[in-house]
Amino acid sequence: MPSFYYKARDAAGKMISGTLEAANRTIVAGKLRAMGYFVVTVKEEQKKSSLEGDLFEQFKRVSTKDLVIFNNQLATMIGSGLTLVTSLNVLSQQIENKKLQEIITKVRDEVETGASFSSALEKHPKVFSELFVNMINAGEMGGALEEILRRLAVFAEQAEEVSSNVKTALTYPVLIVTVALGVVIFLVVGVFPKFESLFSSMNVPLPLPTKIMLKISFLIRTRWPVIVISVVSAIVMFIRYRKTPVGKYNTDLMALNIPIFGDIIKKASISRFARTLGTLINSGVPILQSLRIVETTVGNSAISKIVANIADNVNRGESMSNPLRNNKIFPPMVGHMVSVGEESGTLDSILNKIADFYDSEVNSSVKRLSSIIEPVLLVFIGGVVGIIALSLFLPMFNLVKVFR
């Protein structure tokens, strides 16, 4: 359906503008008049070429920070007594992120035509998640939209902090290992061949470590196309395998069992599960619907499977705590605390306490990891470079014997 750009004046004579989707220009003008606007102009928007759209779409992104600012500003405006349409209209002109600005304008137009706020947001799933839309819907139904928006802002900030800590913990060692690998390849490919010609010209007997390194150097120099193709093929196969349900489950489960890093990922995933579920329940979303949302937003297939089992239990009228206790991923403490929350009627509060506990655990684990990872990596890299250096210098002793 084509999109039309319009300019119109409201009852006070103020100029407004926006876009509406309709079959033709006449329908757009009719909608505007029905809303009490005086139509100034209606023009059909020209569609960008698919190449241009794809090119610029890659650089457009709505960050968590943008959404936090949007939530806080909208909550403040609604709390000040402004209508939702007026608040969205103001934000559509003030927000710096062009993509979010465009989406808010479309949401405002939908709300003006009589759609609910949550249904208008639902049309933009790449920006507003299922969790976001359902919480807004609960806020609309319960008349607590301002509180829900602020809660969403706090939730997004906490989730972003945990995610940032995990990324920090994983990025540093990967960067160090990558640089070390580059140095090793340079030594093996660039330095070793020069020494090889020197040793062979003087008939110097080579020790075993040197022979091994020279063999590796020869293979890398002569078979590098095969090595590159093999590595790329392995990466492509892994990506395709991960896109399958079985592959995603197995790789996510493997990630949880990686030494040291797996523990951090597990704690961050449990925190996300507890924080999301607690926030949804506290916002008035039915528990079964909340579990189905958490199942799709928790970010780990292995944990999603456990959440699906919990949802099935709840659907049968059983307890949430049993599936949490009867698995190898969630610690027993989580199941026991959830059981207490169910019995006492404070499940949302208990879940938020669990999330707070695991957030602090993630932060502590990241700090401990940061303190030990640097010396460990330095020892590892030093060992690899030492072996290469030893392979180079061992023949030197034989070279001295040849000179003598």
Image (cartoon, rainbow, N blue to C red):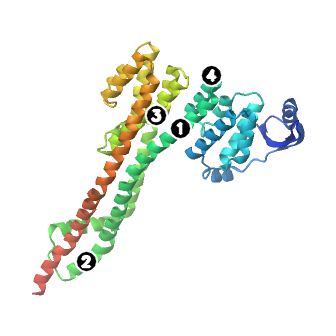
Res 142 label: 4
- Front residue of 43 and 137: 137
Circle nearer the N terminus (2, 3): 2
Mark 3 closeness class: few <14, some 14–19, many ≥20 residues within 10 Å: many
* Spatial separation of the CA atoms under disc 1 and disc 3: 17 Å
Res 195 label: 2
Q: Residue at x 31, y 43 (%)?
A: 258
Dot 3: what SS?
A: loop
Q: Is residue 116 left or right of residue 275?
A: right
Circle nearer the N terminus (4, 2): 4
Res 298 label: 3
* Spatial separation of the CA atoms under disc 4 and disc 3: 25 Å
Res 154 label: 1
Dot 4: what SS?
A: helix
Judged by depth in the image, the label closer to the viewer, 4 or 3, is 4
- Front residue of 304 and 220: 304
* Spatial separation of the CA atoms under disc 4 and disc 2: 78 Å
Q: Is residue 246 visible?
A: no
Judged by depth in the image, the label closer to the viewer, 2 or 3, is 3
Q: Is residue 21 visible?
A: yes
Q: Residue at x 68, y 32 (%)?
A: 120
- On screen, residue 129 above or below 99: above
